[in-house]
């Protein structure tokens, strides 16, 4: 009898633990946004963003507004809105190009000419889902590097998120 009671107790405990391992539904979280590519095309700078919806709910008719800065200088003078429609847990890439500010062009040229090793960048923005009309902020900071042998092409290493540790790592500041 004692052995049967132990087996039943063990089964109940295992069932409870397995239930706790189930997938949690994530909702109302900002998307993960990464700069997948940055390159000059003639006089214009193209930025390609990879947007990953980590939520289980879809985000139809969404609008992204963002600022892109190098060394604290605006690359693009105005915030831009880009339309997309994200499935739950889906990913989409969007591209946008425009003529960057002259100061940003000089910074990128100094990087291409190896006058500097890297540049700090910041990407800040908001995604508004058409279905919920709620703004979800996103931030990313990191470094821009020239791609060797490919003039006008740049790769980025960044850390997304708003935590102080992530910000300190991305900007090179020594946190407490």
Image (cartoon, grey):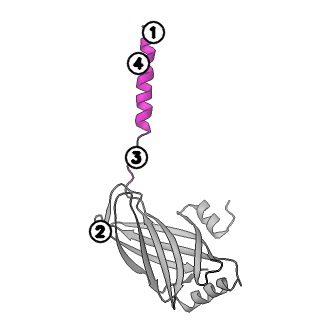
Q: Earlier in the sequence, mark 4 or mark 1?
A: 1
Tell me which residue sits at (58%, 84%) in the image: 152
Which label's residue is closer to the chain start, 2 or 3?
A: 3
Q: Does the magenta stretch include residue 159?
A: no
The residue identified by callout 4 is 8
Report if the CB atoms under discs 1 and 3 are less than 8 Å apart: no
Report the predominant secondary structure element of the magenta stretch: helix
In the depicted view, which residue is nearer to us: 174 or 146?
A: 146
Q: Distance between the residues labelled 1 and 3?
A: 36 Å
- Marks 1 and 2 sit apart, C-alpha to C-alpha, by 59 Å
Secondary element under disc 1, as helix, strand or loop, is helix
**Crowding at mark 3 (Cα within 10 Å: few <14, some 14-19, many 20+):** few
Find numbered disc 3 in the image and state the secondary structure of the residue it sits on.
loop
Residue furthest top as drawn? 1
Name the quadrant of the N terminus.
top left
Image quadrant in which you'd find residue 133? bottom left
Question: Which residue in the structure is indicated by mark 3?
Answer: 24
Give the spatial CA distance, label 2 vs label 3. Answer: 24 Å
Left or right for 21, reference 62: right
As helix, strand or loop, the secondary structure at mark 2 comes to: loop
Residue ID for mark 2: 130
Q: Which span of residues is magenta-colored?
A: 1-26
Mark 1 residue crowding within 10 angstroms, few (<14) / some (14–19) / many (20+)? few
Where residue 65 sits: x, y (%)?
A: 41, 76
Seen at 38% across and 60% down, the residue is: 90
Residue at figure coordinates x 38%, y 58% from the top left: 28
Q: In which quarter of the image is residue 119?
A: bottom right
Residue 2: numbered disc: 1
User: Front-most of 44 and 125?
Assistant: 44
Question: Badge 2, how many Cα within 10 Å: few under 14, some, many 20+?
Answer: some
């Amino acid at each position: 009898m004692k052995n049967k009671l132990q087996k039943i107790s063990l089964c109940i405990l295992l069932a409870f633990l397995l239930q706790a391992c189930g997938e949690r539904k994530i909702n109302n979280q900002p998307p993960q946004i990464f700069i997948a590519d940055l390159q000059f095309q003639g006089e214009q700078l193209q930025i390609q963003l990879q947007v990953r919806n980590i939520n289980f709910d879809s985000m139809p008719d969404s609008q992204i507004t963002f600022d892109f800065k190098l060394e604290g200088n605006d690359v693009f003078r105005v915030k831009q809105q880009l339309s997309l429609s994200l499935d739950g847990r889906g990913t989409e890439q969007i591209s946008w190009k425009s003529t960057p500010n002259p100061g940003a062009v000089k910074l990128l040229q100094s990087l291409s000419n190896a006058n500097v090793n890297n540049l700090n960048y910041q990407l800040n923005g908001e995604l508004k889902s058409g279905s919920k009309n709620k703004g979800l902020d996103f931030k990313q900071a990191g470094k821009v590097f020239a791609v060797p042998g490919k003039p006008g092409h740049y790769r980025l290493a960044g850390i997304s998120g708003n935590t102080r540790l992530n910000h300190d790592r991305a900007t090179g500041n020594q946190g407490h």
